[in-house]
Image: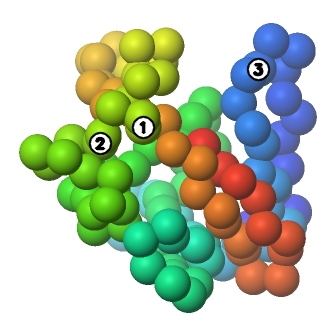
Amino acid sequence: MHEFQTDPEPDDNFEMLTFNNVQISSLKSTRDEAFVKLNVRLTSRPGIHKLVLKVDTGAQGNTLPLRIYRQMFPDLTKNGLPTKNVAKAAHQVRLTAYNSTNIPCYGIIDVPCKFKDSGWENTKF
């Protein structure tokens, strides 16, 4: 996939992260799925880390499974869930799957992300 870019709609409140070149690291024969490796900086661990994400061009936001969040931010986890300073904005977000099933949102966090040689962007998850 080359030169992927979207223009936000006027009422879109999401930050936009644009990829100039996405390298597909995995394709499954039963369903077309694309994954990308992003560099991330974590508050709990020094250095730059890799985060593998599924590319969903129809999504309006970025999500992290709780198990990945717990690994990335053990210092921001209490009783297996995000701490109150992260979870405070969760009531403002409603996540739904394509079949209209509700997806629980436990909080919002900004993660510094970088794709290859692009600049660092604080991206909401």
Question: Going 84% across and 74% down the picture, which residue do you hit?
Answer: 118
Q: Is residue 97 visible?
A: no
Single out the mark in the foreground, 2 or 3.
2
Hey, what amino acid is under mark 3?
Asp
Question: Judging from the image, what secondary structure is the residue with disc 2 in?
Answer: strand
Image coordinates of residue 76 in percent, x first then y, are 34, 52
Which quadrant of the figure contains the N terminus?
bottom right
Say how the picture is coloured. Answer: rainbow
The residue pinned by badge 1 equals 86
Hey, what amino acid is under mark 2?
Pro
Hey, what amino acid is under mark 1?
Val
Q: Residue furthest bottom?
A: 47
The local crowd at label 3, few if under 14, some if 14 to 19, many if 20 or more residues have their Cα within 10 Å, is: few
The residue pinned by badge 3 equals 12
Residue 15 sits in quarter: top right
Give the CA separation, mark 1 to mark 2: 6 Å
Question: Going 66% across and 50% down the picture, which residue do you hit?
Answer: 123
The residue pinned by badge 2 equals 82
Question: Going 74% across and 22% down the picture, which residue do you hit?
Answer: 13
Q: Is residue 16 visible?
A: yes
The local crowd at label 2, few if under 14, some if 14 to 19, many if 20 or more residues have their Cα within 10 Å, is: many
